[in-house]
Each structure stands twice: as C-alpha cells, then as structure tokens.
Amino acid sequence: MNQGIKINDTISLAPWELQEQFVRAQGAGGQHVNKVSSAVQLRFYASNSPSLSPSVKHRLRKLVGSKWTQDGDIVIECDEFRSQLRNREVVRERLADYIRQALVVPKRRIATRPTKASQRRRVEGKRIRAKVKSNRNKPGGHFED
C-alpha cells in the first residue's frame, strides 16, 4: 500500500522513507465520523533520507518550520476531505511541493552601496523630520521636565 513519491526526474522517495497513519478526523461528520479514520498523517524521515543533499535538507527544514520534528522527521496532516484516499493524495502532493521548493537554490544577494543622491535624500528627510519635531518643543529651545 505504501509506495514511494516521485519528486522530479532525478529524485524520488523510497517507500521506507515514508510512514502513513490514518486517524479520525475532527469536526462535524454525522454518525459516520466515529467509525472511519479518514484523516492522514504522513511522516517523512527527512534527516535519514539518502535522496536529498544536506543543503536541500537545510532549506527544507527552514521551509516546513514546525512540521519538522526533533528527530528530523517531517509530519504533514490532512483532514480536509471525507475521503481517506483524497487526503492521502493531498499530503503526498504537499510533501512533494515542499521538496521541490527546497531544491531551488536562492540567488545570492550582491551587496551594493547606496548612491550619493539616495544618501542626500535620506539625510534631507531626517533633517526635515528633526525640524518638525523641534517645532513641537516649547518656545525657548530646550525641553524641560
């Protein structure tokens, strides 16, 4: 039943890297709700995955946030649909999307210096703001307690 997930042409996750658990969904559902486990909890053993490079794992950890456990696993849950099959498809697609996003290496920012004109505009803005604030003081110049 548990099968791997294909991320792209070069990366696919093996079945042993994933664990699915079916739990009861919360919320309204009528008489049928207490009988079926339609919600899906997918656990991906990310830290032990040979499919992902360390840099991808690092970006993935930052991307998923609180879904990353202390053990280095990613836990994704879905109970949006009443169908167990549909919820299962959703969590697998979410995991694949997270990994695809983590595969993209962000462009490195090139540090630039501010132009002389922008420095002058900044200082002029500060001067005007200081003048506005100094006009709020009592006549006589200095603020007194």
Image: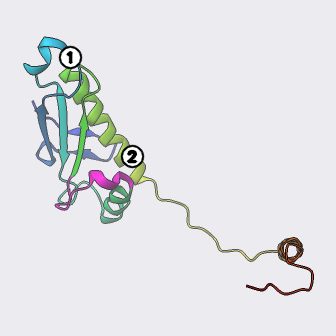
Report which quarter residue 8 is drawn in.
top left
Q: Quadrant of the N terminus?
A: top left
Three-letter code for the amino acid on which mark 2 is drawn: Arg
Frontmost residue, 33 versus 82: 33
Q: Secondary structure at mark 2?
A: helix
For residue 69: magenta? Answer: yes
Residue 70, horizontal then vertical, whole percent: 19, 62
Q: Is residue 4 left or right of residue 62?
A: left
Q: Which residues are magenta?
A: 63-73
Helix, strand or loop for disc 1: loop
Is residue 11 shown left or right of residue 36? right
Which quadrant would residue 92 be assigned to in this image? top left
Evaluate if marks 2 and 1 touch, with contact meaning CB atoms under 8 Å apart.
Answer: no
Q: Is residue 34 above or below residue 106?
A: above
Residue drawn 87% across and 71% down?
A: 132
Labels 2 and 1: the sequence-earlier one:
1
User: Which image quarter: residue 65?
Assistant: bottom left
Identify the residue shown where x is 21% and y is 57%. 69
Residue indicated by mark 2: 100
In the picture of the structure, the residue carrying the numbered disc 1 is 29
- Is residue 129 depicted above or below 98 in this figure? below
In-front residue for pair 12/20:
20
Left or right, residue 37 beside residue 93 = left
Q: Quadrant of the C terminus?
A: bottom right
Q: Amino acid at mark 1?
A: Gly
Residue at the (24%, 27%) spot, across then down? 87
Picture coordinates of residue 23, whole percent (x, y)? 12, 32
Colour pattern: rainbow
Q: Which mark is residue 10?
A: none
